[in-house]
Image: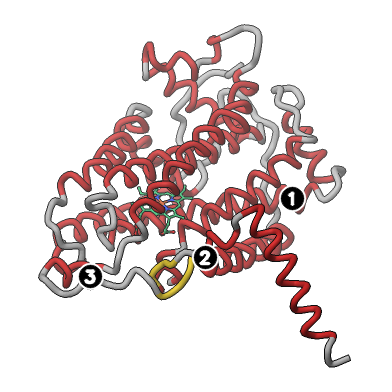
């Protein structure tokens, strides 16, 4: 019996060597700095894991969802009550979308605070902003798909925005084509256009992270700027990073599964055209008060200014230092925006919904 263990071990090594020879998996064990496994530096990976869960659960939901105005909401009811595991899968899809939104924002915050957008990572910061826009687009279109009062009002905003955009907003208008209701086109945006753009951006994002390596810690970076030896780029491996990322991703998946049971994904009443009684999901709430104060155009102007300001950050923050203590102005500006966003959400949460749009949408 004693000789069996080494034999099993040798057998395992043989299988691993055979797989590795064909798939090159050991190539994933390249060195990465130890701090890459810290929670702040793994948020992007957790987000990517979340997107994979959204894709898988989304494919299941698509087996039962029916994207026409007359049947969409009823097909969601079918998913909740009849489709196998439909309510849990829908709940996981809903909760993971919310979690991913939070991890994207935290990831952005980490990159901002550690000044990781500085040379040579300016392009990856801009690609990240593209990913943020895609994430918001996915949540927005997903909200419309439910075709309840909230989704219908979201669609109303979509078409009004299209009108405000003038000639370039034609795609968002209901009368873009008479052959397909706009719900069908937003469904296509949700399951094809936005995931495809997101996938391309994600590939570019990852290739650049690989190309530049994860940024060193700000204090180590600044010490090197002042002549200290370059910080070590070793300490862990990418394979270990992947394992940790998957473990944390599975934890979040478990949390989403529990949430989907204790607090199922909501579905509102059938829409009543011409009424406005709901508020948008939390990630859009910071913009909601501006709509109350200044009308619909604020929903184009305020996010536009915010994205433009974020895009400008790497080109305005030009010093070579990355420690927050040496970038007080930018940290103060970032903190002001973050605090303002929280206050606006709180304010929006307590206000009574107002009417901003009128008329029915086809
Ligand atoms: C939507 C999804 C996103 C995914 C899946 C994603 C994924 C990742 C991953 C896996 C990394 C490696 C290190 C880490 O996890 O921190 C990374 C790095 C980076 N990301 Fe993202 N990211 C996303 C959005 C963003 C956004 C919104 C921004 C900023 C506007 C951004 C900017 C960056 C930059 C500059 C780096 C390099 C950071 C460094 O080297 O320290 N990313 N991203």
Question: Horizontally, is 5 left or right of 151 in the view?
Answer: right
Q: Nearer the viewer, mark 1 or mark 3?
A: 3
What residue is pinned by disc 2? 29
Task: Tell me the number on the disc at residue 89.
Answer: 1
Seen in the image, is 180 located left or right of residue 311? right
Residue 153 location, x and y as percent? 55, 31
In this rendering, the answer to whether 155 lies above or below 346 is: above
Mark 3 is surrounded, within 10 Å at the Cα level, by few (under 14), some (14 to 19) or many (20 or more) other residues, namely: few
Establish whether ligand 1 lies closer than 8 Å to the Cβ of label 2.
Answer: no
Residue at 72% across / 40% down in the picture?
A: 59
SS at badge 2: helix
Residue in the picture at 40% in, 38% down: 130
Residue corresponding to mark 3: 230
Rendered residue at 22%/67% (across/down): 221
Left or right relative to 250: residue 278: left
Residue 21, located in which quarter of the rendered image?
A: bottom right
Locate residue 61, reporting x and y percent. 74, 40
Q: How far apart are marks 3 and 2 (CA)?
A: 22 Å
């Amino acid at each position: 019996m004693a000789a069996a263990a080494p034999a099993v071990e040798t057998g395992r090594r043989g299988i691993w060597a055979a797989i590795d020879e064909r798939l090159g998996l050991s190539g994933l064990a390249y060195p990465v700095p130890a701090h890459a496994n810290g929670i702040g530096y793994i948020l992007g990976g957790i987000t990517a894991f979340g997107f994979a869960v959204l894709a898988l659960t989304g494919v299941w939901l698509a087996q039962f969802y029916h994207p026409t105005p007359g049947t969409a909401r009823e097909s969601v009811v079918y998913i909740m009550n009849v489709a196998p595991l439909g309510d849990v899968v829908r709940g996981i899809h809903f909760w993971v979308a919310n979690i991913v939104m939070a991890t994207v924002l935290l990831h952005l915050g980490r990159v901002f605070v550690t000044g990781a957008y500085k040379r040579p990572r300016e392009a990856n910061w801009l690609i990240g902003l593209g990913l943020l826009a895609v994430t918001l687009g996915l949540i927005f279109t997903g909200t419309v798909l439910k075709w309840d009062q909230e989704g219908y009002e979201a669609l109303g905003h979509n078409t009004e925005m299209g009108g405000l955009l003038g000639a370039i907003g034609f795609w968002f208008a209901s009368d873009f084509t008479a052959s397909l209701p706009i719900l069908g086109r937003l469904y296509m945006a949700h399951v094809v256009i936005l995931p495809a753009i997101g996938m391309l951006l994600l590939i570019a994002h990852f290739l650049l992270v690989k190309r530049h390596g994860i940024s060193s810690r700000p204090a180590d970076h600044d010490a090197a700027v002042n002549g200290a030896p370059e910080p070590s780029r070793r300490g862990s491996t990418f394979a270990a990073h992947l394992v940790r990322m998957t473990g944390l991703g599975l934890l979040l998946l478990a949390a989403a599964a529990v949430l989907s049971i204790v607090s199922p994904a909501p579905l509102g009443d059938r829409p009543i055209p011409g009424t406005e009684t709901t508020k948008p999901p939390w990630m859009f709430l910071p913009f909601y008060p501006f709509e109350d104060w200044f009308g619909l155009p604020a929903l184009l102007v305020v996010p536009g200014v915010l994205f433009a300001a974020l895009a400008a950050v790497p080109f305005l923050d030009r010093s070579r230092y990355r420690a927050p203590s040496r970038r007080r102005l930018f940290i103060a500006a970032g903190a002001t925006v973050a605090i303002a966003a929280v206050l606006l959400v709180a304010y929006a949460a307590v206000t009574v919904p107002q009417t901003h749009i009128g008329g029915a949408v086809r």
